[in-house]
Each structure stands twice: as C-alpha cells, then as structure tokens.
Amino acid sequence: DIQMTQSPSSLSASVGDRVTITCQASQDISNYLNWYQQKPGKAPKLLIYDASNLETGVPSRFSGSGSGTDFTFTISSLQPEDIATYYCQQYDNLPFTFGGGTKVEIK
Amino acid sequence: QVQLQESGPGLVKPSETLSLTCTVSGGSVSSGSYYWSWIRQPPGKGLEWIGYIYYSGSTNYNPSLKSRVTISVDTSKNQFSLKLSSVTAADTAVYYCARDRIAVAAGIDPWGQGTLVTVSS
C-alpha cells in the first residue's frame, strides 16, 4: 500500500493567516492526489482534485500543488469557517489511501 | 444534485455480519462515469477506504478487508450495499457511502452523511 504522511497533525492559526499543509507519498503518485475537508460531525468534502484543481464552488483561497511524492495544500487567508480536519488521498494505486489528517484550529 | 444516504443497523454483535445499504437519489448507479464506494472512519481516527463497485458489478476491495467484504449493486433500486462478516470491536466506525468519479477529474464526492456502526455484545 502507498503510505500518505501528512504534517503537521494539527495547527493553530489566526484569522487571515496563510496555512500550509504537506502530504508526502511513499512512492511516486504523479498528480493522483486529492484534498478533502471534514468539519466536525460531517462527512468529508472534496476540495482539490488532481493535486491542483479546485472543485467547483470551492473558494479560491484554497489551493494545492505538487507532483510525484510531495504535495502542498494552502489556505491563503484562514477564515473561521475553515475550522476542520483536512485529508490528502492518493488514487494512483489500489487500495486508495488517506493521510492521517491535519486538524486546523483558530488561535 | 446527487445525494447518498446510508441505512442499516447501528449495533452489530461480534462475529456477526454488518450490513449497510446506500440509496442514491438525483443520479443513477448505472452511470458508467462513477464507482460507488464505501469508506469508514473509527471514532476519532482517520479514513479507511473499504472498496468500490461499478454498475456492471465489478468490484475492488481493500486487501486488509478483502476476505470479509462484499459490495453489491441493485440498479433496479438505485442502491448499493456493503456486507462485512465476522466483525469485531475494531470494525466500530462511521461508515460512509460515496460516489467516486472515474478518470477525468477523479475524486470522491459527494459522500453520504455517514452512519455509526458499533460492534458490541
């Protein structure tokens, strides 16, 4: 299985801050990587597909980049409604695997 | 707008079989553009992909669960289902059904609201 390592596991930032989360794959997955947002008590929601493509309707403050083994997810200006846990997911190889998640809180 | 809804028992006894159904509305499980997936999340933990089914009945399962998992589809009812046999406390989780886009713009979306299944005697 491809292991997905996310860091940090949690972070605290102020409203308006730039937030960056990294995801590292245990082998080359090209750009076959998605990012999800999961708010407390809710199902995950797809934000970014193919590493850098914004899902329709998702605010432009969210972005993704990277290819191969190293990926980055960025919130350009953190908003109160962005409080959530964020997961990366690879779909290059079965079984699909997720990172351990990054919990984002407001300072 | 496609919506998915899980249903099934919230409590299952150890060694028994967990059975859940996902009802799809606003779209068709017979669409050739999607896989229909099950994903689970133990309380306070991360996400684990269980497997998916194509409308034709073709399946792929997580090898860690493969010996115990069966996913099936009923196109006449626009539903797909999950069976997990010989459950233990480690199978206690919120179970989500979801739609997985194939190839172009691949991604798992939308998801059902999830249903908590507790394994306990």
Image (spheres, coloured by chain):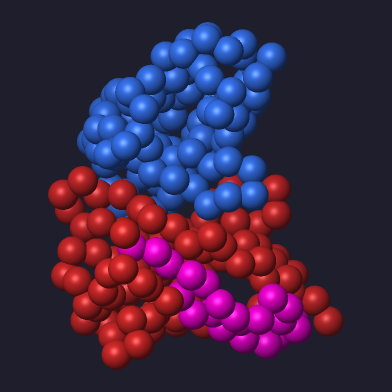
Chain colours: A blue, B red
Identity of the residue furthest to the right in this view: B121
Asked if residue B121 can be seen in this view, the reply is yes
Q: Residue at x 48, y 39 (%)?
A: A37
Q: Residue at x 52, y 10 (%)?
A: A16
Q: Quadrant of the C terminus of chain B?
A: bottom right
Asked if residue A28 can be seen in this view, the reply is no
- Looking at the image, residue A41 lies above or below residue B116: above
Expressed as whole percent of the image width and height from the top left, the position of residue B19 reads 56, 83
Q: Is residue A90 magenta?
A: no
Expressed as whole percent of the image width and height from the top left, the position of residue B55 reads 24, 78
In terms of image quadrants, where is residue A49? Answer: top left
Q: Residue at x 80, y 76 (%)?
A: B120
Please give the range of residues in magenta.
Answer: B2-22
Q: Is residue B6 magenta?
A: yes
- Looking at the image, residue A83 lies above or below residue B73: above
Expressed as whole percent of the image width and height from the top left, the position of residue B28 reads 26, 74
Q: Residue at x 59, y 29 (%)?
A: A83
Expressed as whole percent of the image width and height from the top left, the position of residue A28 reads 28, 36
Q: Quadrant of the N terminus of chain B?
A: bottom left
Q: Is residue B31 left or right of residue B117?
A: left
Which of B66/B37 is in front?
B37
Q: Is residue B83 left or right of residue B118?
A: left
Q: Is residue B89 left or right of residue B47?
A: right
In terms of image quadrants, where is residue B14? Answer: bottom right
